[in-house]
Amino acid sequence: MLNAEKPNRNFMLILSAAIIRCRYVIFFIFLVFGAYCAVNFGRGGNNADLTAFLSPTTETKRGLAIMEEEFTEYATADVMIGNITFERAELLADRIAASPHVSSVEFDHSRSHYANSSALFQVTFDGEADGPATEAALQSLREMLAGYDLYVHTQIGYDFAGQIAREMGGVLGIAATVIAVILLFTSRSYFEVVIFFIVFFFAALFNMGTNFWLGEISSIANSIAVILQLALAIDYSIIFSHRYQDEALVNPSTRDALEKSLAESILEISSSSLTTISGLGSLLLMQFRLGWDLGMVLSKGILFSLLSVFLLMPGLIALFPHALKKTAHPTLIPSVRPWGKVLMKSGYCFVWLFLLLLPAAFYASGKTPYAFYDSEITELRPTEVRTAMHRIDATFAPTSRLALLVPREDFAKEGRILEAVAALPGIKRAQGLANTEAEPGHMLTDAYTPRMFAELADIDIEVATLLFQAYGVKHEQFQAILQRPDSYSVPLIDLLLYLFELADKGVVAPGSTEMDRINGLRGDISMGVKQLRGEHWNRLVFTVELPTDSPEANALVEQIRGIAEAEYGKGSVLLVGDITGARDLSASFERDSLLISFLTNGFVLAILLVTFRTAVGSLLLIFVIQGSIWINFSFPYLQAQSPSFVTYMIVSAIQMGATIDYAIVLMNRYLCMREKLDKKEAMIEAVTQSFPTVLTSGSILTLAGLIISWRVTDVYVGHIGLAVGRGALISGILVLTVLPQLLVLCDRLIARTRFRIDLIEEEDA
């Protein structure tokens, strides 16, 4: 067996020597690839809409794809003014409607628009939310209403990606400062901290500069990747640096010390990264694509961190060996040997406390009210937009929009659907082309003969007949010429659009009273067509006055589906909106949360079994970290908070994959010491030796997460940061309190359930 392993060890030394010998070539490659990543930094799209990451098979995802391709979404804003009379609000509604780029204002005396001396104006603009003209129009509106008690909820001018990038820039600066202080406190040489940050700079640059390889990624993954990469991977630099300094004490040659330390570190660091990668790898198998996004970005970050430590860091140490020696200092971490003695003399009190606490934590974590819709998430840092949203929701009945996509086939069917749905409880408004008036009493989708159109437009019947015949020829409907033209009918909207086309070509002369009157309808008709009529689908839009994530709202969706399918057939229509999006996200959560838990625990258990070769010992480590996850996610329930559902799915995988390393360090030290000492003395030594590692790793991950929650206003990113930081802290505490006593308590079971793996020598566990 020794002879079989010798070539492997020789290979690692040969590889290490080659890396050190080629360090200048490696420096050049890193600089070139770093320049490439810097140029491509920020390329690729960032998507802030969670529903965009649903499975392509979900109704919401399919409907969103159709709407993005075939329809135009015009910008809207909910404008609330408090402490105002209804009469004054009516005058303001007229002024708002007359503002530039405002296409319509919805306001009436109903409870939905005037309540508690407050008025709610639902404003629609004639441009999209990211258009400069729309942003200027909203700013003009704010200035006009500046003297009132004003609240505006809108997405106009809200640069999500830009705001998060600015906030995360500040987070990274603060976190880097805090981490530098921690590293200076826990390091062996002050200059090694400089090397750590050089290595991390390139690893982070490579990761962020290659995100465009993945195409469009989520804004959440793009924003938190750097700080989590720093917190998860800084250990790799520490392990190698300390290995080198140990070897430097017994090897006078810097080159020899580097070769030996790198050969040992490649195996050790690669093994250490496996649990983190396994946790991130489970995210890749989520049905909800946000997990794949974050798993890919962070896994790529871990890979670049490993390459930077293995390839770049040896060369940097070779350049600055004297700086490392001159700035060497004794460890500043106090010995916790007295704490180890307290643990061993206090019976198993922490174990019993943990076992008593665990059922309550499991129950509370299962009762945490996760939010599947943006407005229901508890914000950690209030913003102006969300404050306005909550004020509006507290004053007026909650409303949401629901779009029904039907095949572009029959306006009569659409009219019947609109009429039936408008009568349902919970429906405030039903809108489609089939119930939109061109003029009072004249629907846009009504079929008109030449004589009817002549009367409407006040033109000669001969002119109207020629217009209908020209329309029929263009659309290859030759009955307009070959049969009786007076019986040929065309939907009014199609005829008007054709008339506008002729006017643009100069075929129809402008300036007549009749043409001026028809042209006056052009703007509204054009906007209506872009919003409600597509190439293959038509869209009906309903305003629902029910809470988004409620049984009543879901029941209403099924009622609407039944009405529509009665006209078009089962499975031939699509419903898309906040209600269906929340429902699909909830269904995804139910599947993915179980999958993540099962896969993460399974992957980590397999790694632990290979590493320690003891069934009970491996299960105990997972038991403690899984307990820390339950405790972590019981806090939102106890604090009456509603985090986003993505928080649990993402953080539970990260917490298990990353913080299990703390338990592995303790377990490894304990098993080594157990060969020479009795179980209590072995554990005292294990706690003493593992404390610096747990303190460094745990404090970095804890502070990184908490800084994110403190500085970032986005509700998704904020809750993820809070849960990561809180989870790392809880895991660290349990590893230094519960786990030592639990391992000692189960010492015999750990020994009895050990097994051999023939490919691995017993002494190299």
Image: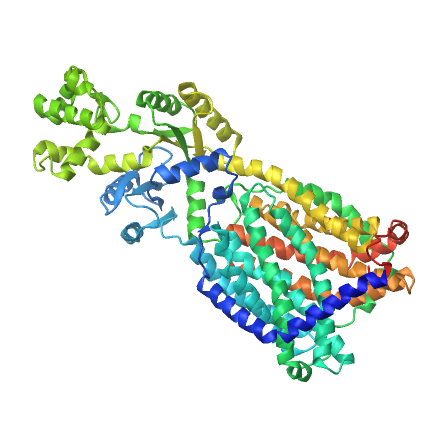
Question: In which quarter of the view is residue 496 placed?
Answer: top left
Residue 278 placement, left or right of 492: right
Q: Does residue 520 show up?
A: no
Q: Is residue 646 above or below residue 448?
A: below
Placement of the C terminus among the 4 image quadrants: bottom right
Identify the residue at image location x=28%, y=35%. Answer: 528
Question: In which quarter of the view is residue 568 placed?
Answer: top left
Q: Is residue 256 above or below residue 632?
A: below
- Residue 446 in the image: x percent, y percent? 24, 22
Residue 570 placement, left or right of 286: left
**Residue sitting nearer the eye, 18 or 612:** 18
- Residue 135 in the image: x percent, y percent? 31, 52
**Residue sitting nearer the eye, 680 or 226:** 226
- Residue 558 in the image: x percent, y percent? 48, 25
Placement of the N terminus among the 4 image quadrants: bottom right
How many labels sit on residues? Answer: 0
Which scheme is used to colour this image of the protein? rainbow
- Residue 45 in the image: x percent, y percent? 44, 52
Identify the residue at image location x=69%, y=82%. Answer: 325
Q: Is residue 580 above or below residue 50?
A: above
Q: Does residue 589 show up?
A: yes
**Residue sitting nearer the eye, 412 or 371:** 412
Identify the residue at image location x=14%, y=36%. Answer: 503
